[in-house]
Image: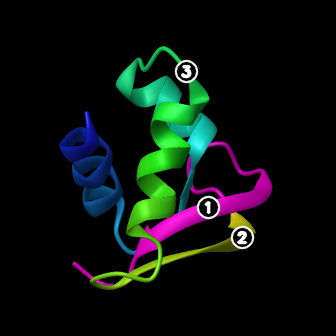
Amino acid sequence: MADKVEALIGRLAPEPICDDCIVERLGLAALHQASQRTNELAGTRGYERGQNECAICGTAKMVIRRKGR
């Protein structure tokens, strides 16, 4: 599951995605499955987490993105 979350973020790079859209796109059972992984990735290997507009749903909220491809 963690690899799928990271792969989805990577495919969208450098566009940001929110945890809700990660859950929906990957068919995860619960929000904490996405948020746990995005919190782990934040600040590592080019990942940024912060307030921005999600590239999928367009809502301004906490998102994650990978800088560049």
Task: Evaluate whether residue 31 shows in this view.
Answer: yes
Of mark 1 and mark 2, the one earlier in the sequence is: 2
> Looking at the picture, how far across and down is residue 14, in whole percent?
39, 75
Q: Residue furthest right?
A: 60
Residue at left offset 46%, top offset 70%: 65
Mark 1 surroundings: few (<14), some (14-19) or many (≥20) residues within 10 A = many
Q: Determine the residue positioned at 23% across, 40% down.
A: 4
Q: Amino acid at mark 2?
A: Asn
- Residue 30 badge: 3
Label 3 is placed on what type of residue?
Ala
Residues at marks 1 and 3, CA–CA distance in whole angstroms: 17 Å
Give the residues in magenta: 54-69
Image quarter of the C terminus: bottom left
| Residue type for callout 1 | Val
- Left or right: where does residue 23 sit relative to residue 62? left
* Image point (62%, 61%), residue name: 63
